[in-house]
Image (cartoon, rainbow, N blue to C red):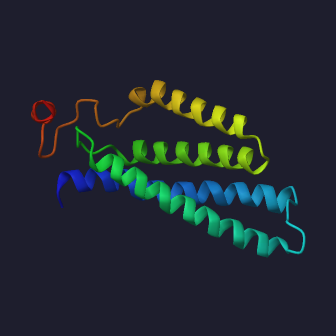
Amino acid sequence: MPPRLQHALRFAVPTFFAVLLTGGAWEVFEVGLQGDVPAGMTKAQAMTMNLEEWAIIAAVQTVVVFLLRVSDVVVRLPTWGFAWALAFWLGLASAGVAHAAERGRTGLALVIAAVAIGVWMVLHRRLPGWPGHGAVALALDEAASERDLR
């Protein structure tokens, strides 16, 4: 498998499952514990409908992450831990933004998204397994990739 594809998949696969798991956990809390069920629906119907929506959200985010990562300049593999950390961070941010948007609080949704992006930008280079930590390059080294950009 080409290194670029392997790199992108290492980020994309955890994204799908982490966003789906985070969205599902949020729905268990919201529907199961808070009883937020639309009129005329049972809790099971509400959970099914909401989980279908989260599956769509997870699929779209997975495609976006894959496309962004397949175009990365440095194609070193992140560790699975780093990839899962990013995926769950995306899932948490998505749940927060979705909850705020559902409540009609667009400004709050934008603030949550901006804070999530800012915190990730500050912290991600400090996490072990970040592809830029000087790991051994797979097929393309960073210097060659930088030259290709010019």
Q: Nearer the viewer, residue 102 or 46?
A: 102
Q: Tell me how many marks there are.
A: 0
Q: Nearer the viewer, residue 15 or 39?
A: 39
Q: Please identify the quarter of the rendering in which residue 51 is found.
A: bottom right
Tell whether 40 sits left or right of 128.
right
Residue 105 position, x and y percent, is 76, 40
Q: Residue visible at 79% across and 56% down?
A: 30
Residue 109 position, x and y percent, is 68, 39
Residue 114 position, x and y percent, is 58, 31
Q: Please identify the quarter of the rendering in which residue 147 is found.
A: top left
In the rendered image, the quadrant that contains the C terminus is top left
In the rendered image, the quadrant that contains the N terminus is bottom left
Tell whether 70 sits left or right of 81.
left
Q: Residue visible at 60% across and 47% down?
A: 94
Q: Residue visible at 23% across and 30% down?
A: 134
Q: Please identify the quarter of the rendering in which residue 25 is found.
A: bottom right
Tell whether 44 sits left or right of 15.
right
Q: Residue visible at 48% across and 54% down?
A: 61
